Amino acid sequence: MNLFLKNVAYAGCLSVIGMTAAYAKSWTLTPQSEVSFTINSLGLTVVKGVFPQFKGHMQFDPEKPQQGLTEFTAQVDNLQVSKPSLRNMIMGEDLFYASRYKTVGFKSTQFKPKGNNRYQILGQLTVRGVTRPVVFDTTLTPNKSNPNVLDIRSTTVVNRSDFGMKKATAGLGEKVHIHLIGQWKAE
């Protein structure tokens, strides 16, 4: 093989390696994202809580999604609730017990691709010092205007009592719907 062809082949190999590395990215959850929950009772939304202070990181390659890893942590003490009259009860010992447990967190164990930018993200959710397995149904969509952004919609449903929270408190239902809506930005 002549020198010109060797250089072309070498450049082609570097280009393929570079493309793979470009897709394997570290991502950070943007501050404009929302980590929240809703608790329903009798089919009505009784209360919504929003965690204004959170951080999240993700390793994700769309070409190898099953190798993805993610984790996030949210501060409990500055939780905003849609019904201020319920704040003390929600932050108290029966529910979040915020004076003792300062954060809630999630750490993934597996990404399962479901097609069309949809994934099941399996992992461990920790609330009140209790860790349980959960599955987040997630959509990670490349942002149309910025290739360094992935739009995210992710939800799961858990039982409050599984995390040591008191059942049937002040008309609040047992099921808690957890939501993560926003964007991951490439680091």
Image (cartoon, helix red, strand yellow):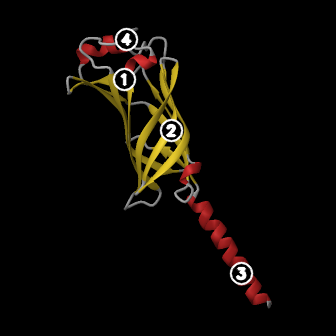
Q: What residue did someone put label 1 on?
A: 79
Marks 3 and 4, how far apart at CA: 65 Å
Could you say whether the residue bearing mark 4 is in a helix, strand or loop? loop
Q: Earlier in the sequence, mark 2 or mark 4?
A: 2
Which numbered mark, 1 or 4, is in the foreground of this view?
4
Query: Residue 49 placed where, x, y %?
Result: 32, 26
Q: What residue did someone put label 3 on?
A: 9
Crowd band around label 1 with a 10 angstrom C-alpha radius: few (<14), some (14–19), many (20+):
some
> Up-down: is 10 above or below 101?
below
Q: Residue at x 52, y 48 (%)?
A: 27
Indicate which disc residue 156 carries. Answer: none
- The amino acid type found where label 1 is placed reads Leu
Crowd band around label 3 with a 10 angstrom C-alpha radius: few (<14), some (14–19), many (20+):
few
Marks 3 and 2, how far apart at CA: 41 Å
Q: What residue did someone put label 4 on?
A: 166
Marks 2 and 4, how far apart at CA: 25 Å
Q: Residue at x 43, y 43 (%)?
A: 30
Marks 2 and 1, how far apart at CA: 25 Å
Marks 1 and 4, how far apart at CA: 18 Å
> Is the C-beta separation of discs 3 and 4 under 8 Å?
no
Which numbered mark, 3 or 2, is in the foreground of this view?
2
> Up-down: is 77 above or below 111?
above
Q: Earlier in the sequence, mark 3 or mark 4?
A: 3
Q: Earlier in the sequence, mark 1 or mark 4?
A: 1
Q: What residue did someone put label 2 on?
A: 122
- Quadrant of the rendered image containing residue 95: top left
- The amino acid type found where label 4 is placed reads Lys
The image quadrant where one finds the N terminus is bottom right
> Up-down: is 118 above or below 82?
below
